[in-house]
Amino acid sequence: MAIKAAQDLYLDPAIRDWVLIPITLIMILVGVLRHYVTLLLNSAPKKQPAAVVREQRALTRSALLRSTAPLSPLPPATYRAISSDLSEGLIAGKWLKPQATSEEEGEKNPFEAAGMEGAMDGMKKQAVMMIPNMVIMQYISVFFSGFILIRLPFPLTAGFKSLLSKDIIMPDLDAQWVSALSWYFLNLFGLNGVFKLILGSENAAVDMQSMQNMSLSAASAMPASGPGAPDYAKLYRAEAENLALAEGVYKWVGEGVEDRVLARYGR
């Protein structure tokens, strides 16, 4: 059986100095710049009325209690007492805010400046993410199309060739060789750890992280009343059912702790 010979390509060191390293540095600097621009575009959160906050926090308390059910630090009597109180309050609508009158709801215009502010913030952040990436990708495609920058130090199967040699039409080229455009995409999705070291875990430098932050901010900016507002009465009833189901999987973390300690440290 014939054995395929290893491919040895000799790359000019100038490619490393003027293409490989600059692309990496540009991606890092653009990510840092994107992070600080996003911070400048973030508007200060608006204060919600106490009734709206209480209405939302009731669901949060219930969800936190359910999340601890499989291995709860609360003793059985305490857990069931809290769960029963929350369930009764949710079913009765104890924490629902007073309903606005039809005249007050009719006066609200969803297209007024206050209602459109959240949508404009999302569009600005999306532009901050997309425009630099489009400019850098176009720059690399024009000036460095077909450049081979680096060889990965580990073997790869042929399935990785379309990812690592995107702009090089060479069917026989080993998948270990990385083109300029592919190096851009690797940096685009692989610099999250670097940005966490530079900017912290809660940063807006990575596209995926920024999209998650945008979705969370959009969810938090949902109107409390009027068109598009969630029906908290239905959410409360569903949450009460979820609490009842969570009691079926409840387990106290201290159950049988004496036997476990004696089995581990007893002689």
Image (cartoon, rainbow, N blue to C red):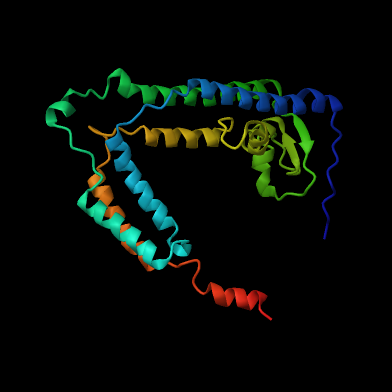
239 and 177: which is toward the camera: 239
Up-down relation of residue 239 to residue 110 (above or below)? below
The residue lying at 40 percent from left, 57 percent from top is 66
**Quarter of the image with the N terminus in it:** bottom right
Q: Residue furthest bottom?
A: 267
Estimate the x, y position of residue 63 in percent, counting from the top left. Answer: 38, 52
Give the left or right position of residue 263, taking residue 224 as reference: right
Q: Is residue 130 left or right of residue 198?
A: left
The one nearer the camera, 102 or 91, is: 91
Residue 54 falls in which quadrant of the image? Answer: top left
Instruction: Indicate the position of residue 203 as horizontal and vertical percent values.
Output: 57, 32
User: In this image, 21 relative to 230: left or right?
Assistant: right
* Observer able to see residue 167: no
The answer to which image quadrant residue 43 occupies is top left
Q: Residue 145's spot in the image, x, y percent?
A: 69, 26
Q: In the picture, which quadrant includes the C terminus?
A: bottom right
Pick whichever, 169 or 122, lies toward us: 122
In this rendering, the answer to whether 128 lies above or below 174 is above
Confirm whether residue 117 shows in the render: yes
- Residue at 84% in and 24% down: 14
Q: Is residue 81 left or right of residue 183?
A: left
Q: Quadrant of residue 76?
A: bottom left
Q: Would you place residue 247 above or below residue 28 in this image? A: below
In the displayed structure, 249 sits above or below 169; it is below
How many numbered discs, if any?
0
Identified at 28% across, 54% down, the residue is: 238
Residue 153 in percent (x, y) is at 80, 45
Q: Farthest residue in the top direction?
A: 113
